[in-house]
Amino acid sequence: MAESAAPTTDTRLQHVGEAVLVLAGSYLIAGIVVAVTDPLTASVVGSVADSNMAKIARTIIQYGTVIGVVAFYLRAIDTDRLVRLAVPSRRTIGLIVGGTVVLLGSQYAINQLLQLANVAPGANQAVLTGVGHPLYYLAMIPVSLLFVGPGEELLFRGAVQGRLSESWGQWLAIIAATVLFGLSHVPAVTGGFGAQLSYALLAGGFGVLLGYLYIKNDNIVVPAVIHGSYNAALFAGLYLGEIGLL
């Protein structure tokens, strides 16, 4: 991800505008596609619109659309220059495993600190949906690995961070993408302001790590797999808890 030697103010503003547009546009288009395909989704998975199967289908459609929109944007501005994609090496696989463990350990430690401070950690609606429905958690494991992780990382680390790094520098790009990443998760969090703030800060901290690993390895596969694996591990733990094995 090369940076411009002497970026102009116009170039910087253009890149900020592109980052905002691709972020807002991805979610907007994904929302429209989900709404348009809802009748088909209901006919395939059943007539109950709020069923867990329907929610899983909507998640797949949403993030599949995000991936498509980001891929179109990256193609339009030269994907090869902005986003690097490579088969993970043995070292990279070890880094992915280590990064996933770090994220899981960090979440546990932060949740413990929040409890000591009498602050209830926020809960994502995707987690609450599966309470009492273990198969939902089980289905969300492959969905996280194949759609959610890759979709969010292509958007935030690939499109947003990648574009901003060309004119604003890598660390400013990481911070900007991280702030947007954290804020984007707030609407899906239940609880009061404290719970939402803690969740946004947690997501933001993860975003810094994922952003750093992306520029360090120059391979979008690294943050995408770590992100997907982290979510999948959480859903696996929730599944095991639902069936009484954890």
Image: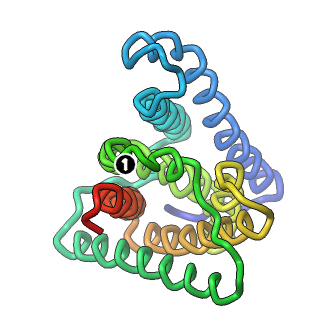
Q: Which residue, as the protein is rendered here, is positioned at the far left?
A: 90
Question: Residue at horizontal 53%, vertical 16%?
Answer: 38
Instruction: Say how the picture is coloured.
Output: rainbow
Residue 217 at x, y percent in the picture: 37, 70
Does residue 166 appear in this view? yes
Residue 76, visible in the rendered structure: no
Determine whether, in the image, residue 25 is placed left or right of residue 228.
right
| Number of numbered labels in the structure image | 1
User: Circle 1 is placed at which residue position?
Assistant: 137
Q: Considering depth in this image, is 61 or 162 the residue closer to the camera?
A: 61
SS under mark 1? helix
* In this picture, residue 209 sits left or right of residue 168: left
| Residue closest to the far right | 9
Q: Nearer the viewer, residue 108 or 19?
A: 108
Q: Position of residue 131 (x, y in %)?
A: 46, 50
Query: What residue is drawn where x is 51% and y is 75%?
Result: 209
**Which amino acid, mark 1?**
Tyr
- In the image, residue 116 sits, relative to residue 73, either above or below, namely below
Q: Residue 187: x percent and y percent?
A: 71, 49
3 relative position to 216: left or right: right
Look at the picture and state if 180 lies above or below 40: below
Figure check: 220 above or below 60: below
Neighbour tally class for label 1: few under 14, some 14-19, many 20 plus, Cα within 10 Å: many
Residue drawn at point x = 34 percent, y = 63 percent: 237
